[in-house]
Image: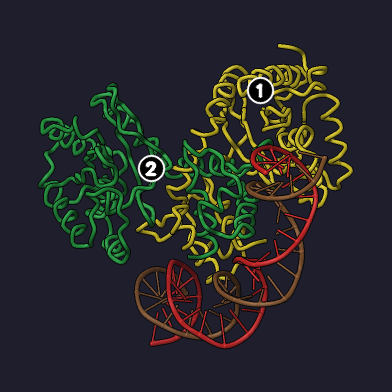
Chain colours: A green, B yellow, C brown, D red
Amino acid sequence: MSTIERALGLLEHFSSQTPEIGLSDFKRLTDFDKGTTHRYLTALKECGFLEQNPSTKAYRLGPAVIRLSAVREKTVPLVQTVAQYVDELAAELHELVHAAAPQARGMSMLYAVDGGNSATRVAFDEAEILPFYATSSGIAQLAYGPATMVEEVMGKGLERFTRHTPQNHEAVDELIGQTRARGYASVDESYEADVCSVAVPFFDTDAMARGTLAIATPAARMTEDMRRTIITRLTQTSQALTKSLGGRVPSQLLDIWPPV
Amino acid sequence: MSTIERALGLLEHFSSQTPEIGLSDFKRLTDFDKGTTHRYLTALKECGFLEQNPSTKAYRLGPAVIRLSAVREKTVPLVQTVAQYVDELAAELHELVHAAAPQARGMSMLYAVDGGNSATRVAFDEAEILPFYATSSGIAQLAYGPATMVEEVMGKGLERFTRHTPQNHEAVDELIGQTRARGYASVDESYEADVCSVAVPFFDTDAMARGTLAIATPAARMTEDMRRTIITRLTQTSQALTKSLGGRVPSQLLDIWPPV
DNA sequence: TTTTGCTGGTTCATTTATTGAACCGTCTTT
DNA sequence: AAAGACGGTTCAATAAATGAACCAGCAAAA
C-alpha cells in the first residue's frame, strides 16, 4: 500500500461516533508510527482535508471535502438525482433507504434516508464503506458491474462480520449467480446481525452498474409480503433512476424486472 | 512538498469547466512525469477520491468526497447552518453571497448563492480556493484569525492576478490593519478585474475567525449606498451566525459593529 | 510536592518507496 | 504507411519516507 493510500486511509476513521481524532488515537487505530502518522496528518491538513480543533488539538475533516463534494455534484450531479428517488421510497415504505457507489474496496454511501417510524430501526452511518462480498449493495454491484470488480474480490481474503458472512469465494460466486438469476440481491444478516436488506443496481450508459439502491429492515419486519413489496418498488425505482441518469438497463434484466 | 500533497493537489484541477481530466492533460497541467502522475491517479482512485469514466478513461472526482462531505457535515454541521444565512442575504440583496473556510493555502468555498437578477453577474466557481492576500474573504480571515496564518502568508511570494493585486507584504499588512480598524474587508478588483466585494469573519468559541461571509458585485453596481447596505447586513448576519454556531465575536469588533 | 504517564510534536541516520526515462499497445490523424 | 497521441508499465537510480529516540507541556497518581 502506497504512502498516499496509507495517508488517505486515515480519513476513513471519522464517523458520527468519532467526529474528532487525536494523533495518539490515530496511532492506536492504525498501528502506524506516531511520527509517520503526524506527517500524514500534517500533509492532509495542508491540503484542507483535515483541520485541527483549536481547543483540543484533535483532527477533524476539513473544508476541502465540502468544496470537492460541491465540485463533484456540480460536474456529476448523481446525489441530487438519486436523492429524490430515495426520499420517495423512504416516505412510502418507512424503512432505511440508501444509495451507494462503488470504490475500489467497497460501496461508498451517496445518500440515505431513514424513513422509519418504528421503535426498532436499522442504524445507519454515512461514513460506512460496505464490503462487496458481505452486503446486498455490494453483491448487486458485483453481479451487474465490470467483471474486473469480481476478480479483485476473488483475489482477496474475506473478513468475517457475523456468522452468516460468506467465508469463501465459492459462496460469494453463488450469491452473485443468485442475484443475476432473480434481478436483485438479498444478503441477510451477513454484515450486521439482525438486519435484512434488498438491493438493486442502477445503470450507466454502458449498461454497467453505476451504483445501487437498497432498503434495510430489522429481521423481524422483513416478512414475505414486505420483501415482495420492496423488490417491486426497488426494481421500478431503479428503472426510473437509470432513465433519469441517461443510463441503460441491460437487456437480461429487462426480461426479469417487471416493466414500469 | 510531500508526495501526499503533490497527489492531493491533482484534485484541485477539477471544476465546472473541467469535470473530467485525462492522464496526459494532468501531465500538462502539473508538469509532473506521466508515470508519476499515473501512480498518483491510481492511488486516489483506489481510495475512492477519483473514478474513471468508463468510455473516455478520463478521471473525475469519486464517491469518497461525497461520503466524507456527509460525514463532515454530520459531525461539524457548518454548511447547513451557514446556508440559511447565505440564502437569506442573496434573496434580499440579489448579488453573489458566499461563505468560505480557511485551509492552509487559501479560503475554501463552503456555500454560495448567486442571488443576482441582473444581466451582469460575478462568475462563481465552487472549486475556487481564494488566496488570502488578494481577496476580501482572505484578508478578513487574516485580520481576525490566528497570527500564525498572517506569518505564513508573509513568508511566501505573492502571485499577481490583476493590476490591483497587492505586490508586497507591506501592502497586505496595510489591508489587514484597515480591516481591523473598520470591521470588514473590501479588496476591490484585486483577484478578478471588475469585481468588488466586502467580507466579514464569523467566529468560533475562542473568538477566532472560523470562516468568512462575503458579497461580491460587478464594480458598476458597488455604489456607496450599496456598499453601506452590504456592510450593515454582513455585520448583522455574522453576529447571528456566530451566535448560531455557539461562537463569540471578539470584543474589539463589538465596539465597531452596530449591535443587532 | 514529586513522580509518572500521557499528549502533541520534532529530529535525523537508516531504509524503503518513489521517481521518471524509456518503453509498450492501441487508436487516430496526417 | 507513418507519425503522433492516448493510457499505461518497468526498473535502475534517486529522493523521500520512516520510526526510534527525544522534546515540552500538562494531568494524574503516588
Query: Dividing the image into 4 quarters, which one contains the N terminus of chain B?
Result: bottom right
Q: Could you tell whether B86 is left or right of B251 in the image?
A: left
Q: Which residue is drawn at the image coordinates 76% and 18% (left, top)?
A: B228
Whether labels 2 and 1 belong to a single chain: the reply is no
Q: Position of residue B107 (x, y in %)?
A: 67, 40
Depicted B141 relative to depicted B104: above or below: above
> Label 1: which residue?
B242
Q: Is residue B161 visible?
A: yes
Residue at horizontal 56 percent and vertical 53 percent from the top: A27
Q: Which residue is mark 2?
A: A109
- Farthest top residue in view: B260
Instruction: Say which quarter of the image contains residue B133.
Output: top right
- Could you tell me residue B124's position as x and y percent? 59, 37
Of A162 and A113, the residue lying toward us: A162
Quote the CA–CA distance across marks 2 and 1.
31 Å
Chain ID at mark 1: B
